[in-house]
Amino acid sequence: MTTVPQKLYALGQSLWYDNIERRLLENGELEAMIQRGDIYGVTSNPSIFNNAIVNSSDYDAQLAELAQQGAGIAAIFDALSIQDIQAACDLFLPLYQSSRAGDGYVSIEVHPDLAHDTAGTQAEVTRLWGLVDRPNLMVKIPATPEGVPAIQHAIAAGANINITLIFSQQRYAEVIEAYLAGLEERVENNLPIGHQASVASFFISRIDSKIDSWLDVIVAEGGLRAAKAATLKGKIAVANAQLAYQLFKQQFSSERFAALQMKGARAQRPLWASTSTKNPEYPDLLYVDTLIGEQTVNTLPPQTLEAVKHHGKAEVSIEVDLDTARAHLQGLAELGVSLDQATTELEAEGVAAFSKAIQTLFEAIEQRAKAIS
């Protein structure tokens, strides 16, 4: 029987798993998920590693050994996380090979404190790329103003890059430009580009969470504006992603990309991230069923993946009623609600959340290391 994830894959959308844990690598479950066709890649971030390491004893033996050897906190985290990433890369290698480098990628993120440091990000990408040393690794760079130049540099250097924390269509356009420019730089230097892959991680549900809170203020005021505001709740995030997908199609059907494609370049796929529903009043798969399209990825946390397997849809939906999507964004502007302000705030909040997660994790590692020694 063909499952929903397999049907989505046939439609051109790959489901990746927004989770990594040592126990899944050791008990065979991650390998089983790959074999079943449930997932076609993995994404990680500081919050995911914080949850995995702090809330389990799975890493204690390795942590104790490293602490007794006198390793520092950052070095311990490197060792714990890189072992997981390498193991996951190895499990996905057959898929990476059979899909001709189309899928089977595992993502690791640069330290969030480097989000506003272009040179530091570039150096960290080089370091992680060398340490993990797997062809199906993707290094995640945040789409901050300082991160964008690092994207071009990393692509030009030959790495696979997952650009994270994209919220606005404007920033997405900058990310696409950085990818294309990086590939063009390689071509100019007579370097191959056929082996490289990149995804642009466009965050979804957080947009509705923020915009809805602003719309609630208008609704509470009453009147005609309140009625209009109420109709837009839960609509902006999907509309924003739908129009971002139009930008993807435009840029990757251009003559500029066609010239790169002739030399082996792959399109930089949009990856829908933050797709678990935050508002319990909304359908649990609101940000999955509505964003199905060719050459896309949707990375799902465990509970959302299970929901997709149980009752997810498998039909192309990303371009359904684009006029309504445009009308939703226009209606938001007419209410005086700034999507640009929301995406700017969300970018800053996203970086701050990852920085807090890594700080919490480092503190927990330090406490365990002290307890052991």
Image (cartoon, rainbow, N blue to C red):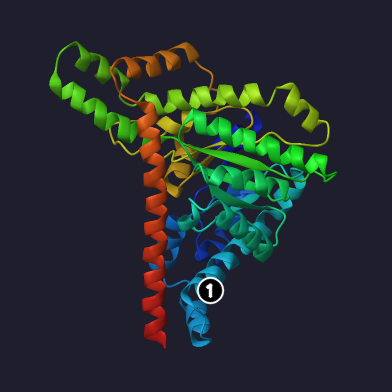
Q: Residue furthest right?
A: 190
Task: Name the spot of residue 356 as percent of width and height, x first.
Answer: 37, 58
Task: Name the spot of residue 148 as percent of width and height, x first.
Answer: 57, 42
Residue placed at 20% from the left, 22% from the top?
218
Q: How many marks?
A: 1
**Nearer-the-camera pick, 256 or 53:** 256
Q: Label 1 amino acid?
A: Ala
Left or right: residue 264 versus residue 10 is: right
Mark 1 is surrounded, within 10 Å at the Cα level, by few (under 14), some (14 to 19) or many (20 or more) other residues, namely few
Residue placed at 52% from the left, 78% from the top?
62
**Nearer-the-camera pick, 159 or 373:** 159
* Visible residue check, residue 345: yes
**Nearer-the-camera pick, 319 or 333:** 333
* Visible residue check, residue 315: no
Q: Secondary structure at mark 1?
A: helix
**Residue matched to label 1:** 75
Q: Is residue 356 above or below residue 187?
A: below
Residue placed at 78% from the left, 31% from the top?
261
Residue placed at 14% from the left, 21% from the top?
221
Task: Name the spot of residue 142 as percent of width and height, x first.
Answer: 51, 46
Q: Is residue 227 above or below residue 90?
A: above
Q: In the rendered view of the protein, which quadrant contains the C terminus?
A: bottom left
Q: In the rendered view of the protein, which quadrant contains the N terminus?
A: top right
Left or right: residue 339 versus residue 291 is: left
Task: Name the spot of residue 103 as percent of width and height, x first.
Answer: 67, 44
Q: Is residue 42 above or below residue 111?
A: above
